[in-house]
Amino acid sequence: MSTSAPTAVNVLDNTFDDPTRRAPLVVGDNDFHSVTEAVCGIVERPKAPPAWWIAFFISVSITGVLFAMIAYLVTTGIGVWGLQVPVAWGWAIVNFVFWVGIGHAGTLISAILFLLRQKWRTSINRFAEGMTIFAVVCAGVFPGIHVGRVWVAYWLAPIPNQMSMWPNFRSPLLWDVFAVGTYATVSLLFWYMGMIPDLATIRNRAKSKVRWFIYGVLSLGWRSSNRHWHRFEMAYLLLAALATPLVLSVHSVVSFDFAVAIVPGWHTTIFPPYFVAGAIFSGFAMVVTLVIPTRKYFHLEEIITLRHLENMAKIMLATGMMVGLAYSTEFFIAWYSGNAYEAFTFLNRAFGPYRWAYWIMVTCNVVVPQIFWFKRMRTKIAVLWVASILINVGMWFERFVIVVSSLSRDFVPTSWGYYRPSIVDILTLVGSFGLFMTLFLLFVRFLPIVGMAEVKGVMPQAHLRDVAVQGHGDYHGDILTEREERNA
Amino acid sequence: MSADTVTQTESSRAREPYGLVAGFDKIDEFLDAVRAVRRAGFTKWDTHTPFVVHGLDDAMGIKPTKLPFVVFGAGLTGCAAGIGLQWFTNAFNYQFPISGKPMFSLPANIPIAFEMTILFAAISALIGMLAFNGLPRLSHPLHSSRLIKRATDDLFLVSIEAGDPAFDPVTTRELLESLGAMSVEAVEG
């Protein structure tokens, strides 16, 4: 750590731990205009770079596989999957829980870190919110096709129908429909609203009529007025305050699907917090997996800095430990409760036929994040990237273990069996990654991937030059209020 | 600058002026100018900034928005709608007798009521914000301004409308220039 106080703008390493110095969140020789250039430059390239086309082609092809598998499923029936009673919930539910969980990091970054005034969120929040929406889209596919007869999927919603029947509102599965539906809607609103000023930036830089028109319509005629900003900020704050309990509720409700059932291994009160911690854990891992190649490829290293990656590594360490605590608590309660079925279930998980999945889960989710105790590991990008992928793998297996190991050993030993996915199961999961990546690549190409207006607000230039008269807080560029001025 | 290629107002035709726009590139000078403009007694004026500048609302004398009340009302509506929906569908219109449980009980209805509260409130926050701001409004005289295109980039602007009683094309321009504006632009209506 250097002892000379560097001027904030030309520090390149901002991962120092000196609490007396404020770490710059944008490094290098950047000003407001260079941030605009760096972010808009990505969208304004006349032609997409070849690597983008290659990635897009691959992703679209894989998405094609997804739709082919769905078509096969719908025309043939749910038997094309590896489902068998009692494992009537298979990969579709595993994938659903996995994808919904991925989304949670986006809302955590955009809403909870906003309320906690974590300024570093500004560089990555747009990106993470985008990821949330695409993950929820992927998640939404699975329950939709899992109902088997997709043409009656509208029975999920309380719509008057020819049977004069209503859905049962005491069912957690119906709560799920509302929770995920609300989550998708609110995430989309939040994402879009935050993007309006940045879309206006792209509009104002448009060199063709078509761009001017498209981004003009998308930005709704935003003219940066402070009278508008005033209400915008209030709306943003309100949405953050609404999204915070929402994000905690969504995975809680998803966990009710399991916890309200009486299957040993599912019927536990620890599920809601355990699921939420796991969701945030996996979501941050996915943000890291995506942001590392993106910042490198589009040269955003000065805006999405090493400190941002390090902070995310710390969150992964913390949430990984929470998940580890949940695993051990489950074991403890299985023993302490004295319930024979519960004890069997957990021994079966760790040492039964699915032990390989269980130990993949423990290794990836509990052991791997331990490397983040060391700063050298947190700041080594290759290590971070590989670890984030392993965590994603581990979190997928967590859901697999919960769903399959409990169901395959139910109360009647004669029905015990070994669940195997079919090739259709596997290709559907692979295909959902194609859908996710396709949406992500379109986002990177056509929309501002960094919240420019928010990043500018936390840059050193946004503060008053004369430090002696700096006003309250330093979340945004601060100026003295009249009252403070009078008192000064 | 891309500004000149797109949507340039025809200056040959004599039109009602919209007003004056002054650009500042330093926050300190901008703030002083905002205070001076307010002190000069203007009422139809605004500032345009690339990001939220905290305390600027106070310097401009903007009253707190009523948006939170709208959102609160919408949240309550959503909550009532959620409970009402569950009561109507499961306890009134099509009764679900399950294990002798009561037809209607609040605890089982909380998750849906909660989600509907959030949903209604969130939608009203966005729509309310846009409605109070008079957006979407795709056509506005300011969009033809050269300076305003930089208010989404790196410039801080003060705009004063010609319709303001205290507005005078010459003295207002002189005032803005004396406040250290790097550029003052007349915008046509």
Image (cartoon, rainbow, N blue to C red):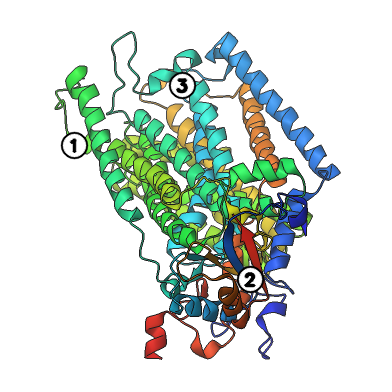
Q: Mark 1 lies on which chain?
A: B
Identify the residue under disc 3.
A88
Residue at mark 3 shares a chain with residue at mark 2: no
Residue drawn at x 51%, y 69% as measured from the top left? B167
Identify the residue under disc 2.
B23
Which residue ends up furthest to the right in the rendered image? A50
Q: Which amino acid does label 3 sit on?
A: Ala
Q: Distance between the residues labelled 3 and 2?
A: 66 Å
Which secondary structure, mark 2? strand
Residue drawn at x 50%, y 63% as measured from the top left? A226
Q: In this view, does A322 lie above or below A249?
A: below
Residue count near mark 2 (Cα–Cα under 10 Å), binned few <14, some 14–19, many ≥20:
many
Residue A122, by quadrant, is bottom right
Q: How far apart are marks 1 and 3 (CA)?
A: 31 Å
Q: Which amino acid does label 1 sit on?
A: Leu
Which of the two marks, 1 or 3, is nearer to us in this view? Answer: 1
Tell me: A57 left or right of B117. Answer: right
Residue A425, by quadrant, is top right
Which secondary structure, mark 1? helix
Residue count near mark 3 (Cα–Cα under 10 Å), binned few <14, some 14–19, many ≥20:
some
